[in-house]
Amino acid sequence: MGAKVPWLPSEIPPGAQPERCPRCGRPALIPWTLRRDDRTKVVLRTWICTECQTTEERPEPE
């Protein structure tokens, strides 16, 4: 496993509802940031695993 990226969370924040990470299998996948795709105008949320630093983007309801 590589080093943790300093601007990504390394701990689950209080009150967060973590999901199981598809990469490492730990319950550490949390919602992180929102962005809008310039081409499709869909709102996407980046999810981050606090253990292995894997990121995943999912569509977010508006």
Image (cartoon, rainbow, N blue to C red):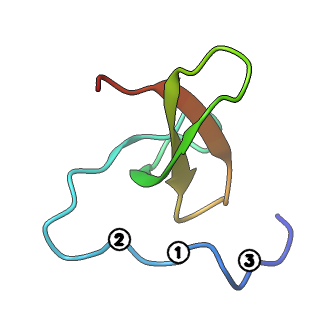
Q: Which element type, helix, strand or loop, lies under badge 1?
A: loop
- In the image, is residue 2 above or below residue 43? below
Looking at the image, which residue is at 52% across and 32% down?
44
* Label 3 environment density (alpha carbons within 10 Å; few <14, some 14–19, many ≥20): few
Cα separation between marks 3 and 1:
9 Å
Residue 38: % across, % down: 71, 29
Q: Nearer the viewer, residue 23 or 62?
A: 62
Cα separation between marks 2 and 1:
7 Å
Q: Which element type, helix, strand or loop, lies under badge 3?
A: loop
- In the image, is residue 6 above or below residue 4? below
Residue 62: % across, % down: 29, 26
Q: Nearer the viewer, residue 26 or 5?
A: 5
- Residue at the disc numbered 3: 4
Q: In the displayed structure, does residue 29 sit left or right of residue 51?
A: left
Q: In the displayed structure, does residue 53 sit left or right of residue 9?
A: right
Looking at the image, which residue is at 38% across and 27% down?
60
Residue 53: % across, % down: 67, 60
The amino acid type found where label 1 is placed reads Pro
- Residue at the disc numbered 2: 12
Q: Earlier in the sequence, mark 2 or mark 3?
A: 3
- Residue at the disc numbered 1: 9
The amino acid type found where label 3 is placed reads Lys
- Location of residue 28 by image quarter: bottom left
Q: Earlier in the sequence, mark 3 or mark 1?
A: 3
Looking at the image, which residue is at 66% across and 59% down?
52
CB under 8 Å between callouts 2 and 1?
A: yes
- Location of residue 23 by image quarter: top right
Residue 37: % across, % down: 65, 29
* Label 2 environment density (alpha carbons within 10 Å; few <14, some 14–19, many ≥20): some
* Label 1 environment density (alpha carbons within 10 Å; few <14, some 14–19, many ≥20): some
